[in-house]
């Protein structure tokens, strides 16, 4: 039975990447050592990290005046690092509260004594649509933080909010390389790798050079300027995670890049949304204009039915469609590595489930 993994993260990876990892074990490039065992100061690893960085630059057309940095600590540590590095003038940031991860970012910024103004929130509507950016009369914020794709609630920005002269900082963890954005529209971008770019343990930061180097006495492990100077090797970087991301990037290039990924993600998510919108049993709670291309929450409104569905789906090889506890119901994550056939199989399954459980509401 083919298994399709709809997990929100860590998430499914491209089959050819898994095959390549297996082939590279136990002896990477005939070195007699696996990637898990090589020094980060070796020529072997230099090639890996430099190639990964170049492929990121090519795929996202990252302008030369931006640095590409590799951190550990997940998206979550960047909720601390971004304000420490970037909120140096006003010590104040604006936040569009679009869901759990935006809220978490605000919380962590507050913990390092940066004032956080929630500019708009859709919490009262259970985050089923995106907040609207108010007019910023004048710039009194170091930046405005947004979460480009709300992994839990299933919303995503297609058009970015207009922040005028104020820098925009984007948490792109769950739609990084899965939807097209212009890097130059952002002062900084952060993204954990384990959703669309590989395995846990690696976080990408893309930051415009003129914004860094303004903070004093930062902890070294959070210092953008230091990481830029040291090619992300101030200390031992997550060697295996960078290697795995490198393979995913190579795969992305072969597949046609981010534009092609967005096209496929649109096609996959449309298939599922169209079914859900037609269905009498299921509802997709997010308003159409704001729907995510990669995280699709849906509900029946009946907990027992949800539990039955999740258990039957699992038996049929459709794994990890249980929704986040804050939304309930189900969620299917359709990241870059999820093939169209996986979504077809899911829709077939849901269709049959609805027919077989027709009377139950
Ligand atoms: C998963 C996720 C995070 C948190 O990532 P960690 O690596 O667990 O710290 C942050 N933001 C978004 C949008 C996410 O999807």
Image (cartoon, rainbow, N blue to C red):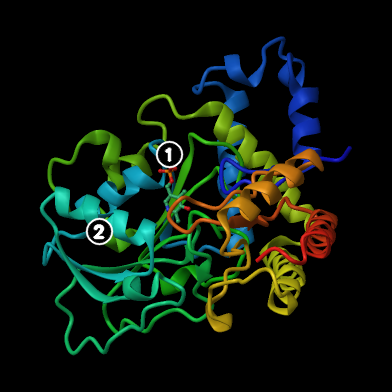
**On the rendered image, what quadrant is the C terminus found in?**
bottom right
Identity of the residue drawn at 48% across and 63% down: 153
Q: Label 1: which residue?
A: 231
Residue, far top: 32
**Residue 135: image tag:** none
Asked if one can make out residue 55 in the rendered structure from this viewpoint, the answer is no
Where residue 136 sits: x, y (%)? 22, 86
Side of 103 where 315 appears, left or right = right
State the quadrant of the N terminus. top right
211 and 98: which is toward the camera? 98
Residue 5, above or below 293 = above
User: Relative to the observer, which residue lies in front, 190 or 280?
Assistant: 280
Residue at the spot 83% in from the left edge and 59% down from the top edge = 356
- Compare residues 111 and 43 and report the one nearer the observer: 111
Residue under pointer 2: 106
Q: Residue 142: name its quadrant.
A: bottom left
Q: In this view, does 181 lie to the left or right of 360?
A: left
Residue drawn at 61 percent across, 67 percent down: 179
Whole-angstrom CA distance, mark 2 to mark 1, is: 28 Å
């Amino acid at each position: 039975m083919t298994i399709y993994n709809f997990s929100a993260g860590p998430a499914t990876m491209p089959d050819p990447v898994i095959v390549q990892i297996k082939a590279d074990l136990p002896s990477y490039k005939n070195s007699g050592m696996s990637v898990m065992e090589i020094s980060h100061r070796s020529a072997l690893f230099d090639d890996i990290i430099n190639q990964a960085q170049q492929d990121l630059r090519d795929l996202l057309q990252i302008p030369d005046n931006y640095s590409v940095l590799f951190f550990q600590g997940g998206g979550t540590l960047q909720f601390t690092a971004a304000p420490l590095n970037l909120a140096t003038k006003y010590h104040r940031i604006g936040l569009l509260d679009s869901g759990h991860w935006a809220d978490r970012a605000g919380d962590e910024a507050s913990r390092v004594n940066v004032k956080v103004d929630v500019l708009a929130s859709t919490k009262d509507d259970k985050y089923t649509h995106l907040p609207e950016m108010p007019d910023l009369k004048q710039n009194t914020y170091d930046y405005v933080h947004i979460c480009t794709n709300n992994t839990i609630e299933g919303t995503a920005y297609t058009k970015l909010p207009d922040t005028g002269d104020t820098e925009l900082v984007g948490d792109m963890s769950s739609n990084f390389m899965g939807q097209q954005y212009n890097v130059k529209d952002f002062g900084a971008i952060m993204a954990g790798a384990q959703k669309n770019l590989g395995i846990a343990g690696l976080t990408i930061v893309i930051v415009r050079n003129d914004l860094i180097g303004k903070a004093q006495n930062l902890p070294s492990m959070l210092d953008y300027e230091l990481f830029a100077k040291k090619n992300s090797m101030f200390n031992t970087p997550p060697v295996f995670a960078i290697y795995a991301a490198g393979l995913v990037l190579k795969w992305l290039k072969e597949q046609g890049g981010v534009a092609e990924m967005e096209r496929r993600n649109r096609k996959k998510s449309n298939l599922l949304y169209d079914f859900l919108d037609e269905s009498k049993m299921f509802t997709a709670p997010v308003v159409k204009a704001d729907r995510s291309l990669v995280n699709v929450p849906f509900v029946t409104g009946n907990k027992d039915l949800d539990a039955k569905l999740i258990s039957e789906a699992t038996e049929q090889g459709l794994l990890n469609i249980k929704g986040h506890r804050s939304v309930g119901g189900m969620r299917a994550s359709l990241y870059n590595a999820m093939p169209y056939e996986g979504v077809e199989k899911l829709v077939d399954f849901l269709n049959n489930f609805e027919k077989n459980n027709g009377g139950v509401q």
